[in-house]
């Protein structure tokens, strides 16, 4: 019942639901206490609503937005409390006394101070909200002063409104004790603090403390574009959860010749973007994008098929290429939208054949095989398991946009897969790394994910006390303690590097201060590699792990594991680069032959039914290489899916960029020549 109520209310925890109920019940109680009147009941109910309201704001509850939508927003709730305080005084017989009139006057004055405070905060935010946000771009030409302290600008309405606590407390104490001086002191303190807050904000609206106008910022960006002359851009639009799709290309972009640039369309993606020295330009407005000087760009690369791509696709002076964010047999890999691009780049021959089979209008001559540059860090399998017991990675994809049972193994097979691995006759170490989108659309998928997480955590706790691992645990205790200390050191240093010596307080400061620092970037990359290596040492090779977030990278999980279980997704194609055994779940129950026929990437896989009964075959391939019947098939499939090892993928990719840039330049020259020639009669 409670969990159903939480889903209906869209709250994340039982405590959040309880706080919401206290707010909902608290205000009627305050009104009842004022009418009766009962001062102690009033004080208790008021305190409860203050605390519950504060908690809901602290956890960013969805209900806060819903209350505002039904005319019960934050300022209204505070105003109602103050009106009920006035009602309480009247009902207690203070209606004709000085205390009553002073309270009303001071509360009105306090309410009056809220308007200029809100107006100033709004003005500051509007003027500091740049039409573009940048990284690694010099905006020295634009005046961007320091932002106000976060103490002033973070949740200013809450801070201002909560100043009435002193007034309310003072009036209630005075009403009980009849010592009016206490009320006057509380009311005065509220007004003085509110006025002080206002005065602290005033300097930031002086002309020299305001950011230059949006037009001047755009002019500065255009000037920078003309000087830098970007030749190839990675264009990306999407939700903040999809930022991984752009992050996977950052290192590739940094290795390209020419003048690369990252072009983003949503503000909320920028904080999720990984560290890079490549210039990053975030342009939320379509009109602003269309008016930027991108005349030097010859090649635009697109990592996702989204509607906002049209804002750049309209530019004829550059060639447009779909590179995607993974190579798989998913239907998304043969999206008919791909016809809008000049070229579609795939990892290997499989991508080309996939489009031919789908017959969605992408011509064979427009497909270029460039390999997968991101896979360079994946280690090839030695043929032997890494630790005394095999490590199996379970990396299911998400539930997708529809309810097709073939989208993910999580719903129908996930718990069976995890249970069989945890209860395997010969011990297995399980790593569980779900897709970042898991549970974002389907409540069932989220529920299964939570159950699987609980199963693994319970098994990990049991293994920690299991006598079979006590000797290994004791032997590694010192090494693990050192590793944990090293992790803390690395994380502290990474935090320092991320801040760049100073944390940006808003987007304007971020754009001003986040200039490229190759030394810092190199150290950050080195520390992240160290973090991943040390993270594995900090835990025993027998300990199960649930791995979420971007810090523990997927390819590091590939290198740590001896085998993988997954679904039809790019994860499978990428894992094939390792040469290790893998299994793919036929969640839609097509049957092994049909499943292999429809999905290229499973030709060298152990095919799992939803019962996951076939997992023994996968484990045997790891523990007894002689029984690995798919080894040769995996080697052949790797070249078919991902292309040849030589030349390297980054060389292939860079060559494809240069070749297409030359075509773009030739096209532009031809058009210019045609336009300059007189039309014959």
Image: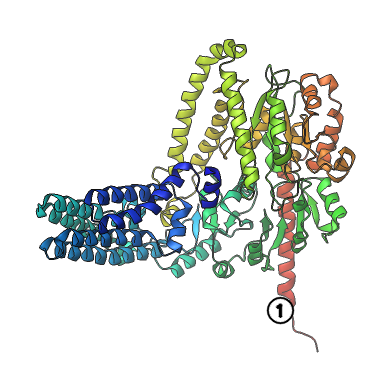
x, y percent for residue 131: 48, 64
Q: Residue at x 25, y 67 (%)?
A: 112
Q: Residue at x 67, y 55 (%)?
A: 304
Residue 489 left/right relative to 559? left
Q: Tell me where residue 88 appears, x and y as whole percent.
A: 22, 58
Residue 584 in view here? yes
Q: Tell me the quarter of the picture where residue 228 sits.
A: bottom right
Quadrant, the N terminus: top right
Residue 332 lies left or right of residue 256; in this view the side is: right
Left or right: residue 356 versus residue 13 is right
Q: Which residue is mark 1?
A: 676
Kindly give the residue lying farthest to the front in the view shown: 36
> Element at badge 1?
helix
In the figure, 112 relative to 611: above or below? Answer: below
- Quarter containing the C terminus: bottom right
Give the image location of residue 178, x and y in percent.
10, 52
Q: Nearer the viewer, residue 460 or 543?
A: 460
**Depth order, front residue of 462/432:** 462
The image quadrant of residue 160 is: bottom left
């Amino acid at each position: 019942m409670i969990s159903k109520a939480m889903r209906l209310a869209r709250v994340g925890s039982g405590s959040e639901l309880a706080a919401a109920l206290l707010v909902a019940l608290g205000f009627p109680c305050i009104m009842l206490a004022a009418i009766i009147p009962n001062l102690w009941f009033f004080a208790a109910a008021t305190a409860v609503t203050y605390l519950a309201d504060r908690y809901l704001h602290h956890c960013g509850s969805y209900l806060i937005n819903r209350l505002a939508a039904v005319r019960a927003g934050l300022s209204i709730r505070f105003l109602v409390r103050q009106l009920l305080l006035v009602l309480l005084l009247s009902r207690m017989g203070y209606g004709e006394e000085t205390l009553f009139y002073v309270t009303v006057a001071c509360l009105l004055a306090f309410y009056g101070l809220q308007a200029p405070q809100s107006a100033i905060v709004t003005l500051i935010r509007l003027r500091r909200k740049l039409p573009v946000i940048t990284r690694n771009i010099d905006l020295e030409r634009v005046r961007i002063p320091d932002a106000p302290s976060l103490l002033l600008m973070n949740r200013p309405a809450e801070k201002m409104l909560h100043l009435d606590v002193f007034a309310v407390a003072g009036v209630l104490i005075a009403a009980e004790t009849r010592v009016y001086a206490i009320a006057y002191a509380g009311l005065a303190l509220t007004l003085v603090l509110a006025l002080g807050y206002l005065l602290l904000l005033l300097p930031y609206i002086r002309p020299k403390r305001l950011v230059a106008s949006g037009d001047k910022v755009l002019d500065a960006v255009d000037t920078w574009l003309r000087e830098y002359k970007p030749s190839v851009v990675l264009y990306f639009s999407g939700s903040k959860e999809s930022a991984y799709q752009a992050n996977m290309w950052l290192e590739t972009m940094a290795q390209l010749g020419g003048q690369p640039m990252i072009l983003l369309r949503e503000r909320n993606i920028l904080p999720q973007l990984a560290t890079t020295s490549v210039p990053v330009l975030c342009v939320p407005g379509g009109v602003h994008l269309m008016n930027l000087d991108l005349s030097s760009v010859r090649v635009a690369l697109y990592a996702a098929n989204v509607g906002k791509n049209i804002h750049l696709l309209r530019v004829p002076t550059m060639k447009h290429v779909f590179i995607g964010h993974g190579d798989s047999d998913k239907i998304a890999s043969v999206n008919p939208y791909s016809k809008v691009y000049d070229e579609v780049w795939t990892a290997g021959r499989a991508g080309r054949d996939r489009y031919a089979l789908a017959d969605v209008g992408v011509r064979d001559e427009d497909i270029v095989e460039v390999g997968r540059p991101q896979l360079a860090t994946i280690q090839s399998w030695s043929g032997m398991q890494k630790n005394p017991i095999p490590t199996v990675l379970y990396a299911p994809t998400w539930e997708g946009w529809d309810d097709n049972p073939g989208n993910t193994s999580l719903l129908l097979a996930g718990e069976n897969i995890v249970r069989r691995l945890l209860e395997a006759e010969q011990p297995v170490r399980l790593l569980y790394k779900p897709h970042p989108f898991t549970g974002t659309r389907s409540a069932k998928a989220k529920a299964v994910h939570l159950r699987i997480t609980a199963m693994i955590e319970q098994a990990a706790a049991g293994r920690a006390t299991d006598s079979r691992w006590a000797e290994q645990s004791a032997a590694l205790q010192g090494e693990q303690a050192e590793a944990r200390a090293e992790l803390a050191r690395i994380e502290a240093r990474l935090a320092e590097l991320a801040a760049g010596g100073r944390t940006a307080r808003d987007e304007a400061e971020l754009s001003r201060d986040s200039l490229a620092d190759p030394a810092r970037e190199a150290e950050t990359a080195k520390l992240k590699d160290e973090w991943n290596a040390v993270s594995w040492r900090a835990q025993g090779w027998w300990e199960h792990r649930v791995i979420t977030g971007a810090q523990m990278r997927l390819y590091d999980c590939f290198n740590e594991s001896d085998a993988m279980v997954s679904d039809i997704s790019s994860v499978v194609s990428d894992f094939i680069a390792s040469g290790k055994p893998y299994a793919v779940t036929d969640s839609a129950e097509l049957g092994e032959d049909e499943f292999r026929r429809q999905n290229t990437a499973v030709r060298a896989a152990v095919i799992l039914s939803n019962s996951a009964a076939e997992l023994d075959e996968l484990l045997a391939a790891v523990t007894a290489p002689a029984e690995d019947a798919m080894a040769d098939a995996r080697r052949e499939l790797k070249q078919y899916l991902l292309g040849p090892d030589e030349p390297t993928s980054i060389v292939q990719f860079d060559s494809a960029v240069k070749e297409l840039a030359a075509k773009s330049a030739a096209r532009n020259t031809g058009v210019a020549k045609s336009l300059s020639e007189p039309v014959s009669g």
